[in-house]
Image (cartoon, helix red, strand yellow):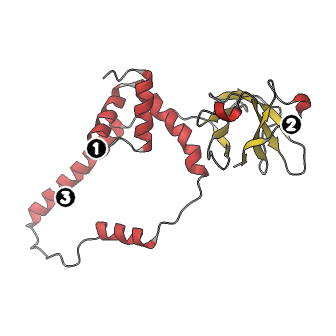
Amino acid sequence: MNYRHPELQDRLAAEYVLGGLRAGARLRFIKLMRDDAGLRRAVAEWEDRLLPLALALPPETPPAHVWRAIAARIAPAATAARTPAPPRGLTWWRALSAGLATAVVVLAFLMLKPPVEPVEVRTVAVLSNDKTPGAMVVNTLPDNRLSVQPMQDLVALADGRALELWSISPGQAPRSLGVVLPGQTTVLAPSLLPQQGDTVAITLEPEGGAPNGIPTGPVVLSGKVI
């Protein structure tokens, strides 16, 4: 298998980030990442894509039976028989061995963990509708431009029309932020970024965008500024 093929690397990175690689497959992938900058980059990109979706999800409180099951697994058995204490010297050597084993595990984790360069972006909004939650993520870049990233192919949603991004402040007319591409990341440079309290939305417009800067089509995606 050619692990340097870009499509295969992207697919494996997605499975790794989503937790789909199990046991031996996951360990093999971690070893491959250690020596392959392309794999590390693919993993970092998938983490950047999925983090806004995770942050946009409302917190859920696990049911009580889940906590009881966790406690039952990690708590020592109440009826466990007590064993005689080992000789003092043996106890010292066991403690030393345990400490060394822990240090080895931590060191191995630090060596295998791929270095990820910090990405100076801030998520502004996650756009959704009833059928496509988390369909698009809007980020601000360090130079105050907007990076608009579809989380899935939105060609069918566009249906041959332009996807135009708007910022809507309470009590004010919508401000066009620009036209975005349905199948890839678009970088926009609006004069004014979306502000706290605004709604960010996508409408379907004629080719090239809404005439006169006024939305004419239906709202197909929307989300509040985070």
Q: Nearer the viewer, mark 2 or mark 1?
A: 2
Q: Residue at x 31, y 45 (%)?
A: 106
* Residue 169 numbered tag: none
Q: Nearer the viewer, mark 3 or mark 2?
A: 2
Q: Which residue is mark 3?
A: 95
Give the Cα distance between marks 3 and 1: 29 Å
Q: Residue at x 68, y 35 (%)?
A: 157
Q: Quadrant of residue 192?
A: top right
Local SS, label 1? helix
One can see residue 208 in this view: yes
Q: Which residue is mark 1?
A: 23
Q: Quadrant of residue 113?
A: top left
Asked if 93 appears above or below 133 in the picture, the reply is below
Give the Cα distance between marks 2 and 1: 52 Å
Q: In the rendered structure, which amino acid carries the disc numbered 1?
A: Ala
Q: Badge 2: how crowded within 10 Å, few (<14), some, or many (20+)? A: some
x then y, percent, for residue 166? 80, 38
x then y, percent, for residue 107? 30, 41
Q: In the rendered structure, which amino acid carries the disc numbered 3?
A: Ala
Q: In the rendered structure, which amino acid carries the disc numbered 2?
A: Thr
Asked whether the residues under the numbered discs 2 and 1 touch, taking CB atoms below 8 Å apart as contact, a structural biologist would say no
- Is residue 38 rendered to the left or right of residue 193? left
Q: Which residue is mark 2?
A: 216
Give the Cα distance between marks 3 and 2: 72 Å
Of the residues under marks 3 and 1, which one precedes in the sequence?
A: 1
Q: Nearer the viewer, residue 21 or 102?
A: 21
One can see residue 115 in this view: no
